Every structure is written in structure tokens, then in C-alpha cells.
Image: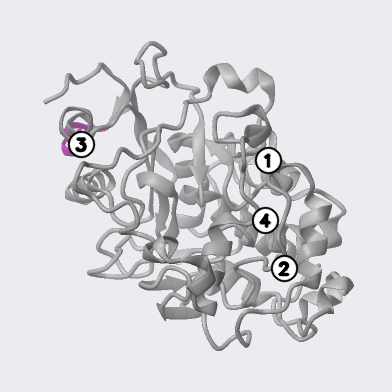
């Protein structure tokens, strides 16, 4: 059993069990540095952090520490686009090409904007070989590649996780209708007014408070391809579906620009490289959990938009992941018994790589967020399971 580091922050006595499980994550479940936050009806009731930002455990995790949040950025991208829908700048049922004319190439003229959010557009991967790292340095190159790419399936007939492409697709629509980068819309219109931060690209000044991402450590008898078995297949013998899956995760490759590099941290890569903390993610989802308006009066989204976003549009086996997924408008939805976001129906949010998660529960009017720097099981990690179970004991 590992030592438990000092636990910092505040915790309402109702959630003592959650605090205990947070400590156990360090003692028994391998956490190095982490934070957990809960907002109940707009009021912060849990805000805890502990551990270290680095593997050597020499840099303490602080109140303002930020960490890569991976696919939680997809939810933030969705909020940014839904705000344009509310502003009358985008119609979800209109063709993407109405706002981005060049998108109409290669059989994509009729794909509606809605399918960019529901992972049904058939664009989870680029077939054209891309220069390593280009997704981190050239938005325009990526956009042109999507314009030329044909759908991998008939749009609307299937869904498959657009793991690294959703941010570019949604982001270009936002850019076309607002004249602003997606990263700026998220910072200025989604996070900032809630006294939160969600950065799609960080500055060198942020490095001193950014936690290092620590890769998942495989056990001696663990199959490295257990989660993505198609990666073990000979590319020359791969089916079209397996080829698509490989490309979804590896084209472009990051080459030498890994998670700790300044290039990766600085990039506008909305699906994947957002940086934030549990407090900020909980504040954003906390506004959504109480009808879209924060306690400071800022309206993030209207109640009708939130209700529509939390409906099921895609459900069943995922063409990329090969397991059941369920999507609303840019949000992952709770799947009881498979991948729940708490016990209540209607919860929505997004998981990130290696146990990170943030979600809103409109039934309980609460939001939960967990961030960490030790990668783990992305599907259902024992750390977030224990925290969420303990959370609902106090509600």
C-alpha cells in the first residue's frame, strides 16, 4: 500500500466518503496527482487535490495545477457550437456545406451539422497519409484534408467515435460562422465567464503549473492490444474497418511531439489536448446541471438546448471502439450497467483518457469532475468508479 499524500482543499461533511475514496486512490489505486470537484445546485461542495505533478514526486499538485483532459475537450467544443445554434448562426439540420462550402467535396454535400456532434458523419479518420505532427501545427492543412476526405460509411447509418477529428470538424464550423478560433470561443465564452479555465493550447508560462502525463504501465501478463486489438493486425491484411480504426488513432502521428512537448501543449487540437482542472470542469457542467445558468447569472446554454443535447442520437456498437457507446449532441450519455454517469437517467458529460471524467446530472442538479495525471483504464477506471459511487451516497 502506497503512502497517502496530504489532501488539500474543502469538502462538505456530507461527502466524507468521497474524500476517503479520493485518499484511497493514492493508497491503493495508483494515483500520483489528482483533483476532484463537485458542484451541487451551483454551489461548490467538494474541491480537493493531492499528490504530485511528476513521476518523481518532487513537484506538488497545487490548487491551480492543470492537466491534459483529453476527450473532455469534445464536450467543450460541443458547447461552443451549441452556443452558435442559440445565436441563430447555425442550424443543426442544415448541411455543413452551408457554412463551410469546401466541405461538400467527396460526397459530403448533404451531411448535416448535427452529425458532426453525434459521431455519425463517417469522418473518424483521414485516409490520406498526413505529415507527422501536422495536426499540432497547421489547422488549415487538417481542414483541407477533411474537405477531400470521403465518408467511411453512409452518414447517419452508423456511428463511430471521432476520437481525433471531431474538434477540427466542429471547430471549423464555429470559425466560419464567428470568425473566431474555437480555442478562443471556449476560453472567452464557455469557461471564462464561469471563473473557470479550459485551455486548448497552453503558453510557456503555463508549463510550471502543468502536470506531466504519466503513461499507463502495463502489467507483465497484460496484452498491450487488449483495448485496441486491431492495432496488432498486419496493416497489409487489415479490413477496411480495421484500417479506419488504425488511421483514427495514428494519422497523423504525433512523431516526437509527445504529450510533454511544448508543441503538443501549444496546439489547437480541440478533441484531445485541452488542459484544465477538476474545479473548472465541474463549474462548467454545474451550470448545465441547473438549467444552463450559473449562480453568477451567466447563461451558458438555454434549458431547451440542454434537453436536446442530452437526448440519444447514436446508440449501439461503435464502429471505432467496437463496444457500445451512446451520444447526444457532442456529449457521452450515461449507459446503465455498461458505462454509467451516476445512477440517475439523463446524465451527460464526457470521459477523457486514463480515468478523467466530467458530467452533469440534471436530476440531482450536480456536476462531478475528476482529473489526474496517471493514465489508467479509459473505459471504466476503478478510481472514478469509486469516487462516483461515494458521491451519490452523500447526495
Residue 239 in the image: state x and y as whole percent.
50, 78
Can residue 88 be seen at all in this image of the molecule?
A: no
Quick check: 193 left or right of 37?
Answer: right
Which of the two labelled residues, at mark 2 and mark 3, occupies the earlier sequence position?
Answer: 3
Which of the two labelled residues, at mark 4 and mark 1, occupies the earlier sequence position?
Answer: 4
Residue 252 in the image: state x and y as whole percent.
65, 53
Distance from disc 2 to disc 3, alpha carbons, whole Å, reads 42 Å
Most common secondary structure along the magenta stretch: helix
Distance from disc 2 to disc 4, alpha carbons, whole Å, reads 9 Å
The residue that disc 2 covers is 85
Which of the two labelled residues, at mark 2 and mark 4, occupies the earlier sequence position?
Answer: 4
Which of the two labelled residues, at mark 3 and mark 4, occupies the earlier sequence position?
Answer: 3
Farthest top residue in view: 58
Farthest left residue in view: 1
The residue that disc 3 covers is 29
Q: Which residue corresponds to the image point at 30% horizontal and 64% vertical from the top-left? A: 339
Residue 43, picture quadrant: top left
Q: Which residues are magenta?
A: 12-21
The residue that disc 1 covers is 187
Q: Nearer the viewer, residue 168 or 326?
A: 168
Q: Secondary structure at mark 1?
A: helix
Please determine whether, in this image, residue 318 is positioned above or below residue 190. Answer: below
Amino acid at each position: 500500500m502506497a503512502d497517502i499524500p496530504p489532501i488539500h482543499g474543502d469538502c462538505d461533511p456530507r461527502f466524507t466518503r468521497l474524500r476517503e475514496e479520493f485518499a484511497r486512490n493514492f493508497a491503493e489505486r495508483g494515483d500520483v496527482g489528482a483533483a476532484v470537484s463537485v458542484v451541487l445546485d451551483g454551489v461548490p461542495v467538494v474541491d480537493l487535490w493531492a499528490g504530485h505533478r511528476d513521476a518523481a514526486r518532487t513537484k506538488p499538485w497545487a490548487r491551480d495545477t492543470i492537466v491534459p483532459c483529453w476527450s473532455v475537450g469534445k464536450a467543450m467544443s460541443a458547447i461552443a457550437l451549441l452556443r452558435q445554434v442559440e445565436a441563430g448562426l447555425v442550424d443543426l439540420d442544415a448541411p455543413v456545406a452551408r457554412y463551410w462550402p469546401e466541405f461538400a467535396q467527396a460526397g459530403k454535400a448533404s451531411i448535416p451539422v448535427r452529425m458532426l456532434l453525434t459521431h455519425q458523419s463517417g469522418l473518424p479518420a483521414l485516409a490520406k497519409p498526413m505529415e507527422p505532427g501536422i495536426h499540432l501545427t497547421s489547422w488549415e492543412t487538417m481542414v483541407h484534408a477533411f474537405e477531400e476526405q470521403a465518408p467511411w460509411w453512409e452518414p447517419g447509418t452508423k456511428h463511430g467515435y471521432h476520437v481525433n477529428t471531431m474538434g477540427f470538424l466542429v471547430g471549423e464550423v464555429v470559425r466560419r460562422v464567428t470568425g473566431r478560433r474555437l480555442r478562443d470561443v471556449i476560453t472567452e465564452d464557455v469557461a471564462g465567464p464561469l471563473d473557470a479555465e479550459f485551455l486548448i493550447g497552453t503558453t510557456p508560462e503555463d508549463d510550471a503549473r502543468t502536470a506531466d502525463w504519466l503513461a499507463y504501465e502495463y502489467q507483465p501478463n497484460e496484452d498491450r492490444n487488449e483495448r485496441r486489438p486491431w492495432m496488432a493486425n498486419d496493416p497489409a491484411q487489415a479490413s477496411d474497418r480495421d484500417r479506419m480504426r488504425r488511421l483514427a488513432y495514428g494519422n497523423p502521428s504525433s512523431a516526437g511531439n509527445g504529450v510533454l512537448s511544448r508543441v503538443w501543449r501549444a496546439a489547437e487540437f480541440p478533441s484531445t489536448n485541452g488542459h484544465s482542472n477538476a474545479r473548472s470542469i465541474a463549474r462548467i457542467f454545474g451550470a448545465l446541471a441547473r438549467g444552463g445558468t450559473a449562480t453568477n447569472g451567466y447563461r451558458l446554454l438555454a434549458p431547451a438546448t440542454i434537453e436536446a443535447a442530452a437526448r440519444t442520437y447514436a446508440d449501439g456498437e461503435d464502429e471505432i471502439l467496437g463496444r457500445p457507446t451512446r451520444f447526444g449532441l457532442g456529449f457521452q450519455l450515461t449507459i446503465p450497467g455498461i458505462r454509467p454517469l451516476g445512477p440517475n437517467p439523463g446524465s451527460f458529460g464526457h470521459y477523457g483518457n486514463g480515468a478523467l471524467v466530467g458530467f452533469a446530472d440534471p436530476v440531482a442538479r450536480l456536476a462531478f469532475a475528476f482529473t489526474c495525471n496517471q493514465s489508467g483504464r479509459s473505459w471504466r477506471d476503478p478510481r472514478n468508479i469509486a469516487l462516483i459511487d461515494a458521491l451519490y451516497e452523500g447526495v
